[in-house]
Image (cartoon, rainbow, N blue to C red):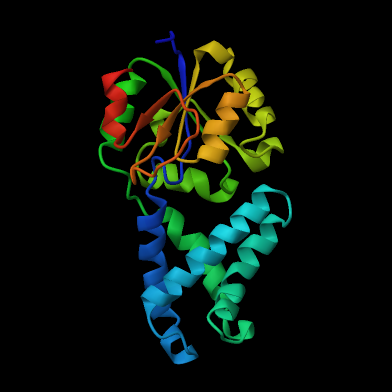
Amino acid sequence: MKNYRHIFFDLDNTLWDFETNSTETLTELYHRHHLQKLGVPTAAYFIEKYKERNHMMWEQYRLGKIGKNTLRDDRFKLTFWDMGLDAGLAPPQLAVDYIFESPKKNKLFPDTLETLEYLNTKYALHIITNGFNEVQHIKLKASKIDHLFDEVIISELTGFKKPDVKIFEYAQHKTGAVAEECLMVGDGLEIDILGALNANWDSVFFNPEKISHEKFTTYEINHMAELRKFL
């Protein structure tokens, strides 16, 4: 194993349990905004259709096909359209409330805090995220892990999104690291792992769902505590 000095983590779906936190928020908003009265039959159906649309639009955003405001403002309208409803029925406050409420949720993947506290005694820890600047720091603080990271590198502040090698080069410059000292931990094969590979970094694919794949990664784990076995 290389002599790592810097460990970089993705945030959403790697440390911060995006699916659980998002589902909890969307369920609350379904009831708060009385979406059943607008023709949305169940919270589960609303959440299913929203997540499909949100995933699609995040991919468009990552590829530069749409801007941040389009993603934030239109995903709920288009979710209504996807459900066969008039997009104009979507309460405008839905988009506002989601951005305000969701980052305050604090569910982490099991053993994340304990693992980070262990690693923090041995390595410099950092975040590299494609998430929005105004919410990522809130997530870190709400889940009480913000103090464990030296640098929080957010794509929209750098002008580059993962897997663009330039954001990894920016991270090296920001932290004073060299590629041989860097290890990237993330759940995205096409974003975190490919980006790290192109930057000549080693990588850890966080794969809690144990999905089958043929991508190259230096290490693969299904549980965050597994990092302690080799770091």
- Inspect this view and state whether residue 195 appears: yes
Q: Is residue 190 left or right of residue 15?
A: right
Which residue occupies the foreground of this view, 173 or 80? Answer: 80
Q: Is residue 46 left or right of residue 230?
A: right
Q: The N terminus lies in which quarter of the figure?
A: top left
Is the residue 14 above or below the residue 230 in the image? below
Q: Is residue 211 left or right of residue 215?
A: left
Residue at image position (35%, 64%) is 24
Residue at image position (56%, 68%) is 95
The image quarter in which residue 169 lies: top right
Q: The C terminus lies in which quarter of the figure?
A: top left
Residue at image position (59%, 31%) is 195
Is the residue 33 above or below the residue 221 in the image? below
Residue 137 lies, in percent from the top left, at 49, 43
Residue 199 lies, in percent from the top left, at 62, 22
Is the residue 140 above or below the residue 147 in the image? below
Furthest residue in direction top, as rendered: 3
Residue at image position (62%, 82%) is 87
- Inspect this view and state whether residue 34 appears: no
Residue 75 lies, in percent from the top left, at 60, 68
Q: Is residue 58 left or right of residue 15?
A: right
The image quarter in which residue 104 lies: bottom left
Which residue occupies the foreground of this view, 36 or 31? Answer: 36
Residue 225 lies, in percent from the top left, at 26, 31
